[in-house]
Amino acid sequence: MDGRKKELLKSLPKIDEVMLIIEKRGAFAETTRSIVKSACRSVVEGLRQEIMTKKNALDIRLPEEKQVADQVMEFIDSLHQYRLRRVVNATGVILHTNLGRAPLCAEALARIADVAAGYSNLEFDLEKGERGLRYNHVQRLLCELSGAEDALVVNNNAAAVLLVLNTLAQGREALVSRGELIEIGGEFRIPDVMEKSGTRLREVGTTNRTRLSDYEKGIGPETGLIMKVHTSNFRIVGFTEEAEIRELVALGKKHDVPVMHDLGSGCFTELDCYGLEREPTVCDVLETEVDVITFSGDKLLGGPQAGIILGKKDILQRIKKNPLNRALRIDKLTLAALEGTIYLRPGKAVSHLGVLRMLTEPVSDVSRRAKKLLAMLRKERFEGLTLSLKKGFSMAGGGALPTQEIPTMLISITSKQLSPGSLEESLRRPDVPIIARISDNEVLFDLRTIAEEEYSFIRDGLKYAMSS
């Protein structure tokens, strides 16, 4: 370490002296001494790291203690700001996992507010006046919607898969096609989930071709389950073959082995009626008499994060009795949101659920809304900004319809003052951040994922970006 760095390290502000300045400002009336001290340490440590990592120490100028006190106060103020915030999704990815997937419908939000405001009959049977089961609140709705004999809800689909595997095949083998050993977001892999469940993976077939005979050859004394996995976020095309779920169900019955289908997105709507790819619906799969299926609540169902398990009553009763079920159970707010999300009439679901509305909105309507927003932004006369409309494509996201490009209308933005990267970064800084995408040196707003009530956020976000 050179002499200049040693000198700078010795000159770092003293914690006690900075705290004394802050105390004189009356900050301790707003927060505790321990929080102020911790904030001082964080700020001073940041200065220390800057000294240690900077190549040329001659460029470093340490702030005065009053300036450090200002930084500490800013740090403390940031602790009181909400970290989880609303954002505008201008990316065109409808089920954007990083942005919270499905936005909840008005009914779900109302149910959450009503249930959260006071006590509820979460586990209380109002008719019998005794303890009840939390799952009963949505069990009947899910069964009516899907045609399943029984239903259970846990905290996400990975948990649902884990619970089913642990219940039906712990210590035994589960047969899975090699082409279905997928990795979902966050580097979570089906083989890893299986391992944690206590199930041994038995791969059958090849990456691109797995026949029914491959499953039959794999069945043995240690087989506890036949598992089919929706490939969600990718497709294998070309020289391919896969066993149909009906064939697997018949095979399972022949050998007295339960069959599970992890559907992933959990679609209840006939999407091909709206010009989209055909996605197997939950009802379609259950009609095959499969023993159990799992899927997410916050994808094509359009509800809160949840893992939904549907299937035959005897199988579901075994799963419900698994001690892991308690560790994976959902809370009252998730139940309330799910109850407000489930529509028994498909037509009403399309008009009320944001995900389905965005997926199925005609491109002519998207274009009309884009022109409305463009006119609104042009009225602001942003200096140095060029705004224009261009055609593009949205994506379903969330592992749903991975190859489907959905026609959309984009607002293209270029700036004389800011590079596309700098403009995109600045748009993420307002109170309601705008999350856009960059393509061909343009910042793009995709109107398919922007609601009309969010236009003012777009306008204010651009004002902020151009003034910062």
Image (cartoon, rainbow, N blue to C red):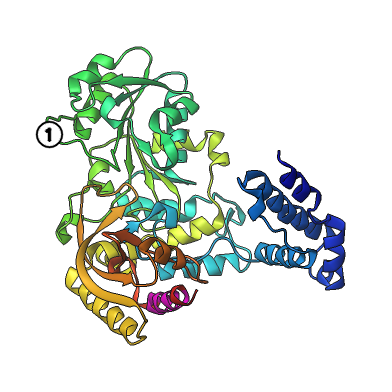
Residue 18, position as x, y percentages in the image = 82, 62
Residue drawn at x 38%, y 78% is 453
Q: Nearer the viewer, residue 35 or 165?
A: 35
Residue type marked 1: Gly
Q: Is residue 311 above or below residue 77?
A: above
- Magenta stretch: give its range: 454-464
* Extreme-top residue of the structure: 221
The answer to whether residue 343 is seen in the rendering is no
Please, what is the dominant secondary structure of the magenta stretch? helix
Q: Is residue 118 left or right of residue 450?
A: right
458 part of magenta stretch: yes
Q: Is residue 118 above or below residue 457?
A: above
Q: Is residue 342 above or below residue 180?
A: below
Residue drawn at x 45%, y 36% is 317
Residue picked out by circle 1:
238
Residue drawn at x 59%, y 65% is 116
Query: Which of the 4 image quadrants contains residue 374?
Result: bottom left
Query: Which of the 4 image quadrants contains residue 106?
Result: bottom left
351 part of magenta stretch: no
Q: Is residue 270 left or right of residue 385?
A: left
Q: Is residue 314 left or right of residue 124?
A: left
Q: Nearer the viewer, residue 37 or 151?
A: 37
The answer to whether residue 422 is seen in the rendering is yes
Residue drawn at x 27%, y 69% is 412
Residue 40, position as x, y percentages in the image = 77, 57
Residue 324, position as x, y percentages in the image = 55, 35
What is the quadrant of the N terminus in the image? top right
Q: Nearer the viewer, residue 317 or 73?
A: 73
* Extreme-bottom residue of the structure: 379
Query: Which of the 4 image quadrants contains residue 443?
Result: bottom left
